Image (spheres, rainbow, N blue to C red):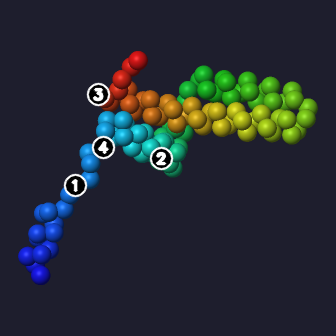
Amino acid sequence: MADNFYADWFSRTQPPRLTPEQMWERETIQLRNLATSETAQTLIERFDVPEVNEAEELFKQVLQEIADPETRNKLDMAAGKISRAYQILGFCAGRFSQDSRARFF
């Protein structure tokens, strides 16, 4: 019984090695998951970026000028999605900028 186990173990085939593109994609998915985690949110809240604060304040002022509440809500939701996407992009770009595999075209 034990002989069969070891024979099976050592004779098994390994899965094919990932291509550089597949490894890059896997790491990007892991980073996206990390960027949307509670830990990342905690880190983000520790940074005080004046440009972000100014942009948010300006956006709030412009939203108040829109009379239709439904339109105002749609714009606010769309801006929130864009902001979140840029946040994830910034997190990933910051990580990959330190990666020796980063390629600049």
Amino acid of disc 2: Asn
Residue 23 is marked as none
Q: Outermost residue toward the bottom?
A: 1
Kind of residue at disc 1: Gln
Q: Distance between the residues labelled 3 and 4?
A: 18 Å
Viewer-proximal residue, 11 or 44? Answer: 11
Q: Position of residue 22 (x, y in %)?
A: 36, 40
State how far apart marks 1 and 3 are (Cα). 27 Å
Q: Earlier in the sequence, mark 1 or mark 2?
A: 1
Q: Where is residue 6 in the image (x, y as percent from the top left)?
A: 11, 70
Indicate the position of residue 88 as horizontal and vertical percent values. Answer: 52, 36
Name the secondary structure under disc 3: loop
Of the image marks 3 and 4, the number of the one nearer the N terminus: 4
Residue 2 % position (x, y): 10, 78
Crowding near the residue tagged with mark 2, few <14, some 14–19, many ≥20 C-alpha atoms within 10 Å = few
Q: Is residue 42 visible?
A: no
Q: Which mark is residue 33?
A: 2
- Camera-side mark, 1 or 3: 1
The kind of secondary structure element at disc 1 is: loop
Q: Mark 2: which secondary structure?
A: helix
Q: Is residue 21 left or right of residue 10?
A: right
**Which residue does the image show at 16% across and 66% down from the upper left?**
9
- Can residue 87 be seen here? The reply is yes
- Camera-near label (1 vs 2) is 1
Q: In which quarter of the image is the C terminus?
A: top left
Please, which residue is most extreme toward the top here? 105
- Using the image, tell me which numbered label, if any, was put on residue 14: 1
Q: Which mark is residue 18?
A: 4
Identify the element where label 4 is drawn. loop
Residue at x 64% of width, y 33% of height: 82
Distance between mark 4 and mark 2 Cα atoms: 20 Å
Q: Tag count in the figure?
A: 4
